[in-house]
Image: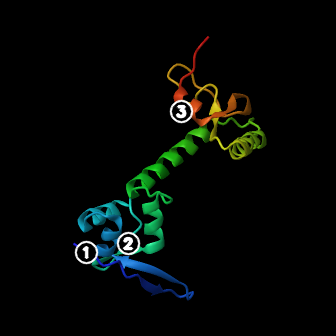
Amino acid sequence: MHLNPPIPRAVEYKNRTSICTIGLREAAALAKCSPDRLREMAKAGWVPGTKIGRCWIFPVHLLEGWLAGRLRMRPRYYAREQIFRNVARRSGLSKRTPEWADLKEIRRIYVECRRISQQTGVKHHVDHIIPLAGKKVSGLHVPGNLQIIPATENWAKINRHEIE
């Protein structure tokens, strides 16, 4: 069975730029999957597409980027959960930061961590030596309790602290 190549349609916007889009069937042919599967993936937020009325449209440049692996999509529910997690984390940090803590020094440590990550190409985290919410002991969000370590080492540590 021979499929015709998708025919992109240009959509005009107020600022006079245009984006080429294709429909569900053309996008499914490009992605080499069924239209139903692509629709479900777009609904979940895994594929860059949107529903306008009763039709699904897919921007060609985003779909090609997704197919090439250059564009990572996350499901919509994940983004919402991540926001709630970040709010709870910031709230916990503010509760664990005493008034006497040197906020400029804390900020400097986070900037240094970002610089090291960019310079080495290895993701680094600012880690609390004594975890903020440990089972046996809890630390504070102060400069003396912060260290810069590689992300893999931080993930392996998982909120544990050895009591000596």
Give the mark toward the camera: 1 or 2: 1
**Label 3 neighbour load within 10 Å: few <14, some 14-19, many 20+:** few
Q: Is residue 1 visible?
A: yes
Q: Which of 48 and 2 is in front in this view?
A: 2
Q: Give whichever of discs 3 and 1 has the lower sequence position.
A: 1
- Dot 1 amino acid type: His
Give how far across and how far down residue 26 sits, in percent: 32, 75
Give how far across and how far down residue 156 sits, in percent: 53, 28
Label 2 with label 3: CB-CB less than 8 Å? no
**Would residue 103 appear left or right of 94 to someone viewing this image?**
right
Give the secondary structure at mark 3.
Answer: helix
Label 1 with label 2: CB-CB less than 8 Å? no
Give how far across and how far down residue 29 sits, in percent: 31, 70
- Residue 97 has which mark? none
**Label 2 neighbour load within 10 Å: few <14, some 14-19, many 20+:** some
Give how far across and how far down residue 28 sits, in percent: 31, 68
- Dot 3 amino acid type: Trp
**Residue sitting at x 51%, y 44%:** 88
Estimate the spatial distance between the alpha carbons at disc 3 and disc 1, rounded to whole Å: 49 Å
Q: Mark 1 points at which residue?
A: 2
- Residue 155 has which mark? 3
**Residue sitting at x 53%, y 88%:** 14
Give the secondary structure at mark 2.
Answer: strand
Q: Nearer the viewer, residue 121 or 116?
A: 121
Give the secondary structure at mark 1.
Answer: loop
- Going by the picture, which residue comes out furthest to the left? 1
Q: Give whichever of discs 1 and 2 has the lower sequence position.
A: 1
Q: Give whichever of discs 2 and 3 has the lower sequence position.
A: 2
The C terminus, quarter of image: top right
Q: Mark 2 points at which residue?
A: 50
**Would residue 54 appear left or right of 133 to someone viewing this image?**
left
